[in-house]
Image: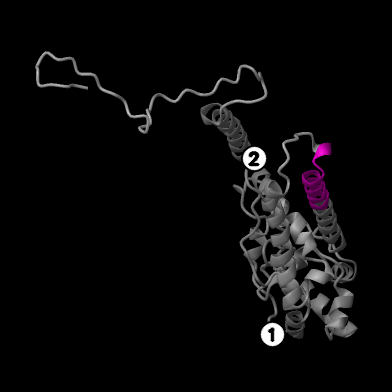
Amino acid sequence: MAHGHKSNEKVVYVGDSRVRKSGPMVPPDYSAYPGKSEVFIPNFLLKEWMVGCVALVGVLVLVMQEAAPLGYPADPTNTTFIPMPDWYFLFLYQFLKYPYVSGDTLKIFIGSIIIPGIMFGGLLLAPFLDTGKERRFYKRPLASAFMFVTLIACIHLTVVSWMHYQKELTDKNIIPEHIKREHEMEEAKKAGGGGGSSSKPAAAAQIVAQDDKGYEIYQKATCINCHAKDLKGVSGMPALRGIGDKHSKDEIMTIIKEGKAPGMSKQYDDNIKKGLTAADIDVLADWLAKQKKQ
């Protein structure tokens, strides 16, 4: 601050208290509260990133160590296939099976949109509804109730869904496609086939007696759902070309009546319900026994 025009006069600058001074950001001192609090940036955030990186590396190791279970190419005509979501969606998959959230369009909308929306919306609102500073879960009834109810419901529905899936496989005598394909590849490697499907050698045979009445009955029978019109098999199901070299007529009839593991359930009653007679099934078994390699 100068009062004249002399060149040697001392100039003093007076600061303005309205101007905020900016300096280096110094984190607050939490030494009085050891282990109870810390700066979010960078201390806490750095710890979270490190934990996230460790978890990510663990997931990558598991992914690279175990190959993904692959089934056969998708086939919309395969009526024996049981669709299953990934394990983390099993609870919702099971929930949608219940009658009060399935059937008509309104129930499906409620089960797939409204109820899950309420559940996830409750999780989003939990921090705003429970604003207490208490960390012990038994002193936070609202947040603890949300957590335990959600956890118990998810675990229960997941277990029930998996048990129901296993029961379906047992009742229908079905082996999951990825397991069946893995077994076929292992058998082909042992036989020196280079990892191909075990049904390929049978596919080289031709259909015998296509003008026979048995072929007409075959197209009406339930066999066509799994073994296809050309007898080559659908989505990994065994081919019927050349089956006469493996089984006699009586053995084929026994398979139709009693089923065969893995993958084939009893078909006799299903064919009767479909409109075939006992005589038709007898003709069908006789025609299948004629399917021999030429």
As drawn, the label of residue 211 is 1
Which quarter of the figure has residue 117? bottom right
Q: How is the image coloured?
A: one colour
234 sits left or right of 167 in the view:
left
Determine which residue is flagged by label 2.
66
What is the three-letter code of the residue carrying label 2?
A: Glu
The residue located at (18%, 21%) in the rendering is: 2
Compare residues 239 and 144 and report the one nearer the observer: 144
Q: Which residues are magenta?
A: 138-155
Q: Is residue 211 in the magenta section? A: no
For discs 1 and 2, the disc positioned in front in the rendered view: 2
Q: Residue 133 placed where, x, y %?
A: 72, 36
Compare residues 102 and 199 and report the one nearer the observer: 102
Residue 242 visible in the current orientation: no
As drawn, the label of residue 196 is none
The residue located at (84%, 52%) in the rendering is: 156
